Image (tube, grey):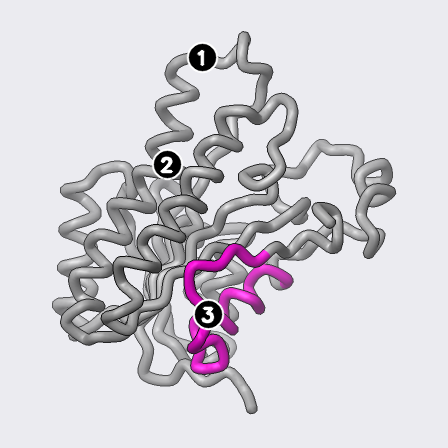
Amino acid sequence: MHIDLKNKIALVTGASRGIGAAIAATLASCGAHVVVNYRENRDKAEEVVKSIQASGGSAEALRFDITDEEGVKGAFQDVIGRHGRLDILVNNAGVSKDGLLLRVKPGDIDEMVSVNLKGSIFCSFHASRSMLKQKCGRIVNISSIVGLGGNAGQSVYSATKAGLIGFTKSLAKELGPKGILVNAVAPGLVETDMTKGMDAASLVEHIPLRRLGAPGDVAGLVAFLCSDLGSYITGQVLVVDGGLYT
């Protein structure tokens, strides 16, 4: 068996770099047409699209701010209007403003809640409206192991990622009877812009697999969940952390 997403339309938020870019590329390699969402970095998003197309895949870049509900509504109407459907939504966009709680600025709190939680809710709302008509669909929310176990200096970030897990479990119960599966993926330490500057050597000592994760490690699981191979999995949080959280 292999993962076959031919004729599927997928939208990945925050897909101009890191885990999002890897997810977009992997879904496209499985046959899906991928909408690469970005908010600011058009050049990077276009690079992702060109890379996918050069490998024989199908993709397009689409700018919209997931924290702007009207903008989200318009973007989803555009995608569904042009392609006739939306089969897969991956809520990947996220932001982390690390710091002890007593030093966290109110603006940082607002940004993390808006991007990490509200944005995913807005996108899921508009995606599910189309999926309900189709009576099928996949929504995958990218959470984090800190949403499960917490981490000093990331209390607000952890709260938003934990909230995303609660949202995932509740939405799975709402949409399951209509054939829509909703799951969360919780990455551990993955080599992205968020982990740049960290002492990798000391970090891997705590990881049983003795390495940081790669964006592709997360992308492979997302593709599985979006395929028929994961057709009886919903409301779950799947951890990709090399054993760190074990």
Expressed as whole percent of the image width and height from the top left, the position of residue 170 reads: 34, 51
Marking on residue 160:
none
Q: Which residue bears the numbered disc 1? A: 105
Mark positioned earlier in the residue sequence (2 or 3) = 2
Amino acid type of the residue tagged 1 in the rendering: Lys
Q: Nearer the viewer, residue 40 or 19?
A: 19
Identity of the residue drawn at 48% across and 51% down: 142
Q: Which residue bears the numbered disc 2? A: 115
Q: Which residue bears the numbered disc 3? A: 233
In the image, taking residue 75 as reference, residue 184 lies left or right, namely: right
Mark positioned earlier in the residue sequence (1 or 2) = 1
Q: Can see residue 43?
A: no
Where disc 3 sits, the SS reads loop
Q: Can see residue 73?
A: yes
Q: How many marks?
A: 3
Give the residues in magenta: 217-238
80 up-or-down from 100: above or below: below
Residue at mark 3 to residue at mark 1: CA–CA distance: 38 Å
Expressed as whole percent of the image width and height from the top left, the position of residue 109 reads: 41, 21
Residue at mark 2 to residue at mark 3: CA–CA distance: 26 Å
Identity of the residue drawn at 60% across and 44% down: 145
Expressed as whole percent of the image width and height from the top left, the position of residue 156 reads: 49, 25
Amino acid type of the residue tagged 3 in the rendering: Ile
- Which marked residue is nearer to the observer: mark 3 or mark 1? 3
Q: Nearer the viewer, residue 34 or 105?
A: 105
175 up-or-down from 65: above or below: below
Where disc 1 sits, the SS reads loop
172 up-or-down from 8: above or below: above
Q: Nearer the viewer, residue 150 or 20?
A: 150
Mark positioned earlier in the residue sequence (3 or 1) = 1
